[in-house]
Amino acid sequence: MTYAYQRYYRGMVEAVICDWAGTTYDFGSMAPIRAFQELFAGEGVPITLPEAREPMGTEKREHITRVLNMPRVAQAWQEKHGKPADDQDIDRLYAAFLPMQIAAIKANAQPVPGLMDTVSWLAQHDIQIGANSGYNREMLDTLAEIAAEHGFRPVSNVSATDVKRGRPYPHMSLKNALEIGISDVRACIKVDDTIPGIEEGLAAGMWTVGVAISGNEAGLSLQEWSALNEEEQSQVRSRANRRFRHGGAHIIIDSIADLPHAVVQVEQWLAQGYGPETPGLAGVTILPGEALPQ
């Protein structure tokens, strides 16, 4: 006879693992975009905002490679430089990109509104905070040092160059989980503003929360978002939410300010015996404006 057994985790959420740019800091994830556009403009191959944003969430050398492989960019590069971009070009571009990115990080290192209220709520509920990023270690340390001055100090902080493979592979989130010391990956929530970041969390066996407005999918600075009327904001939100639903995010929020409501939803699912792998749970949208849960 053949038997199959299933084990359920019915405990509480123990940790949230957050992305940095566009999720906790730098509303609109502007620092990477400005650096990438500056980099390619300097090569005589300007790139558009959508081209700069499409690979967001990946390790930055990989990001450069993916931009170069876009048909329009590849053709423009060929016309400008007389040959396709090769590994030596990518190495040179990456080296030139590093100081541009660090300067842009410093210029955009402001917390997303509501971050510190969420940090306080998580602490009150004994939920640890980890963080990871497509930035390399030097870039991440630059941002983390500034964030620490504001009072944001994740227990675990992992960069894309700390692991063998960055997003969409699960390595960074799993390293976070190990460093935090969680009991089960189903006790973790991965929070990210990019589809590769959601894929990372799913591959790690975690719950996932997509951040629709403060990050890459909306692609707007706080000033640009605030300048939109209600109908325009609704259109941007619908487009971003659709992307995250298709990407498999369990829950979709506007920004980190709404994360406590997502935690409550996940704990309700856990109490019912559901896990991240349970069919039919993806795409739950939490609208902003509600008071923080108790």
Image: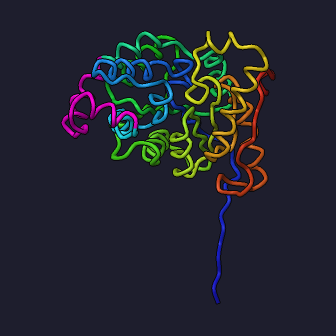
Residue 236: give x, y in percent of width and height: 69, 26
- Relative to 147, is 122 on the left or the right? right
Is 82 included in the stretch rendered in magenta? yes
Residue at horizontal 63 percent and vertical 26 percent from the top? 123
Is 193 included in the stretch rendered in magenta? no
Residue that protrudes farthest toward the bottom in the picture: 1
Residue at horizontal 44 percent and vertical 40 percent from the top? 179
Residue at horizontal 25 percent and vertical 37 percent from the top? 85
Residue at horizontal 41 percent and vertical 16 percent from the top? 105
Residue 265, by quadrant, is top right
Classified by dominant secondary structure, the portion drawn in magenta counts as helix
Residue 9: give x, y in percent of width and height: 67, 55
Q: Say which of 69 and 221 sits in front.
A: 69
Location of residue 162 with respect to 26 vertically, above or below:
below
Residue 2: give x, y in percent of width and height: 63, 85
Residue 135, by quadrant, is top left
